[in-house]
Image (tube, grey):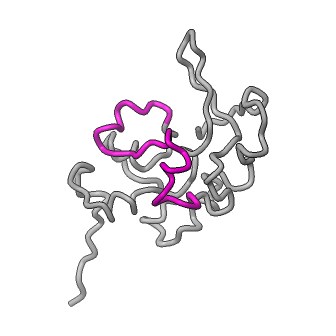
Amino acid sequence: MGQVKVRFWETTPLDQLDRAQWEALCDGCGKCCIHKLEDEDTGEMFPTNVACKLLNRHSAQCSDYPHRHQFVPECIRLTPAKLDDLDWLPPTCAYKLRGEGKPLPGWHHLNTGDRESVHVAGMSVRGWTISESDAGDLEYHIVDRDDL
């Protein structure tokens, strides 16, 4: 008789995930690495098409994840305790969805077994971003996207 594969992302509370499970929950979209501008008067956030200089815009993965804070000190280490305070996470973010008790989207790699599924579904930054090294003023790069 075969073993039943435990779908930890559906059954384990976020604060009980081990480090490997927490990291595996990331859908690999890269949207959290997009620069956002905040209106100082209203607090409204405006996403741009400008990606962090460390983001590999094809894979949507950090090019130096273990050392990212050395190069980008303001990079946030996402933890279960910080989820409620980060209102800029995209609505498709697996951490955000699970924190709200919602299921992961069908295109998520934990459901499909394929890390490319986020890109095939058009849910990643692949193909529409530029690097902050090339962007110039962020004000000229504000985008209107429902998935950010």
* Front residue of 129 and 94: 129
Q: Is residue 51 above or below residue 18?
A: above
Q: Residue furthest bottom?
A: 1
Q: Residue at x 52, y 40 (%)?
A: 90
* Front residue of 130 and 143: 130
* Front residue of 111 and 86: 86
Is residue 109 part of the magenta span, yes or no? no
Horizontally, residue 31 falls left or right of residue 98, namely right
Q: Residue furthest front?
A: 70
Point out residue 125 in the picture as x, y percentages from the top left corner: 65, 51
Q: Is residue 99 visible?
A: yes
Q: Is residue 128 above or below residue 27?
A: above
* Front residue of 89 and 108: 89
Magenta residues, as a range? 62-88
Q: Quadrant of residue 38?
A: top right
Q: Residue at x 43, y 50 (%)?
A: 94
Point out residue 29 in the picture as x, y percentages from the top left corner: 56, 53
Is the N terminus in the top left, top right, bottom left or bottom right quadrant? bottom left
Horizontally, residue 27 falls left or right of residue 80, namely right
Point out residue 144 in the picture as x, y percentages from the top left corner: 70, 32
